[in-house]
Image (cartoon, grey):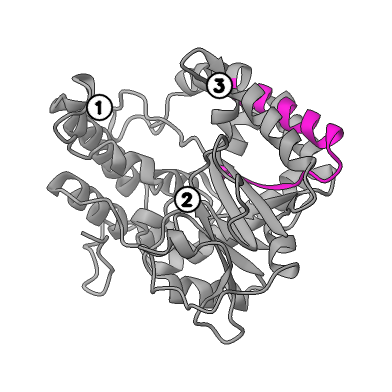
Amino acid sequence: MTLVCLCFRAHRAWRFRDYNYFDVGRRHDYFGLEENRRRVERLASHRYGPAARLLSTLLERHPGFAFALGLSSPLIDQLQAFAPDVVAGFRGLFRTGRVEPLASTSHRSLAWTVSPRESERQILRHRDHLREAFGKTAAFFGGEPMTDLPTLAAFLETHDFRGIVLEGGPAGEDADASAWRRAPTARGLPLLMTRPPRFDRRLAEPPGSVLCLSMDVEVLAASDAGAGLSAAFADWVGAISGRRDVSFATPSEAVERSRPGDRSPGAGVPSARATNELQRDAWERLASLEPAFGDGGAGPEAEDFRRLTSADHFERMALRPAGSSPASRDPDVPYEAYMVFRHALEDLGRRQISPLRPLESGARQPAV
């Protein structure tokens, strides 16, 4: 039997307001409250709310339907502040007992982590956040690209995680992703490797013991060439639910009900993000603030530091390749994103007791 493991994820970083040089030392509100409110309310109305309702309907309609759901801390915070009814909808999904929470770094910062220690703090913080918001303890980690799989897996294993949902799987292993693997850790932490969802073609012939598909929650409420994907997805779930050779499973269930593959995974997934000078300088300045704010504190300065670690901010500083849309090729966009980030860092540095510390020589650089 093929076990279909669906892993949905949702994340929205706090977006900067137009924080400029003259705000440094005078204002500490780096993130536009009203702009973020409007954006989240719009997404809640048109994407997150309808997606939660669709998933709830499918859980009621198909007793065997199950999946995993990963929501980032910034998104949970914004939904709790601006769209609490959507949080209640997600909470209802977890209460069915057929939805497993996925942990991650709290602010989706793994691709641009300032240090392994900060990643570890955010993972544990996010697991606590999920427990507080939804009453469920995450047993699996997933939803982010990673470059140091052995180190991460060893940390997760020592903190009683039961496995990792590996986005995309190690390079070149997509064809072999029909069985889970074991990480090179003391107890062999299970690894589930995801594939992109293609609901019109997947499972025409069962590919093996486990099929793990990963997708954004927003996609469920999006449209494709005028055709609603929600209806197509609902039909696909119904078709799968009617088969005897296929069933849905959460990550924990998939590992419990199947055997691992013979091959060992690679060391990690090579990062696809090339760094430029803007990103590198921003990262170094952010890393220099970790000794003051990266201690797991709960104050406003520590929270601002964590918000600044989100990979989204660095992605906005990326130089767009040829062939992108004209707007995304605007050379001012990465520079403007960098300058706003730089101003916020300068102000955050002034808020600490000691002067801005230089980057320590042992700090790890992001992958190039």
The label on residue 305 is none
Please state which amino acid type lies under the numbered disc 2: Ala
From the image, which quarter does the C terminus lie in?
bottom left
Which residue corresponds to mark 1?
Answer: 20
User: Marks 3 and 1, how far apart in space?
Assistant: 27 Å
Residue 242 image offset from top left, x and y in percent: 80, 40
Which quadrant of the structure image shows residue 151? bottom left
Which residue corresponds to mark 2?
Answer: 302
* Numbered disc in front, either 3 or 1: 3
Residue at the outermost front position:
205
Residue 284 image offset from top left, x and y in percent: 23, 56
- Residue 13 appears anywhere in the view: yes
Nearer the observer, 338 or 96: 96
| Highlighted range, magenta | 47-73
- Residue 74 appears anywhere in the view: no
Element on which disc 3 rests: helix
Nearer the observer, 239 or 147: 239
- Tell me which label, 1 or 2, sits earlier in the chain: 1
